């Protein structure tokens, strides 16, 4: 029996694992990776801030 894996799910799992590893290394490690991933130098920095839809705001009202 052949198991078909969904490439989108695998990509999401890989991205989430990379984000967890980056969080362990600290915020500067994520910025360093974003700077390395940015090419050419005229492009904006490639850092992204993941968000969860419907998450409560951290701001105190």
Image: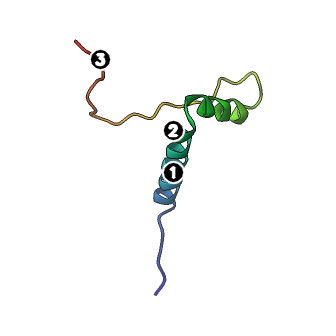
- Distance in Å between CA atoms under marks 3 and 1: 27 Å
- 44 left or right, relative to 9: right
Residue at 47% from the left image edge and 74% from the top image edge: 4
Quadrant in the picture for residue 57 = top left
Give me the disc on residue 17. 1
- Give residue 43's position: percent from left, percent from top: 70, 24
- Give residue 42's position: percent from left, percent from top: 75, 21
Q: Callout 2: helix, strand or loop?
A: helix
Chain-order first, disc 3 or disc 2: 2
- 34 left or right, relative to 40: left
Q: Callout 3: helix, strand or loop?
A: loop
Chain-order first, disc 3 or disc 1: 1
User: Where's the C terminus, which quadrant?
Assistant: top left
- Give residue 10's position: percent from left, percent from top: 50, 59
Farthest left residue?
61
Residue at 48% from the left image edge and 48% from the top image edge: 16
Whether residue 27 is situated above or below residue 7 in the rendered picture? above
Q: For the residue carrying disc 3, how many other residues have a C-alpha within 10 Å: few (<14), some (14-19), or many (20+)?
A: few
Q: Callout 1: helix, strand or loop?
A: helix
Disc 3 vs disc 2: Cβ atoms closer than 8 Å?
no
- Distance in Å between CA atoms under marks 1 and 2: 10 Å
Farthest right residue?
40
- Distance in Å between CA atoms under marks 3 and 2: 21 Å
- Give residue 2's position: percent from left, percent from top: 49, 83
Quickly name the residue at label 2: 23
Give me the disc on residue 59. 3
């Amino acid at each position: 029996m052949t198991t078909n894996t969904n490439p989108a799910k695998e990509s999401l799992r890989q991205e989430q694992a990379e984000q967890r590893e980056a969080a362990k290394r600290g915020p500067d490690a994520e910025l360093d990776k974003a700077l390395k991933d940015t090419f050419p130098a005229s492009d904006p920095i490639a850092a992204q801030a993941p968000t969860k839809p419907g998450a409560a705001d951290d701001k105190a009202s």
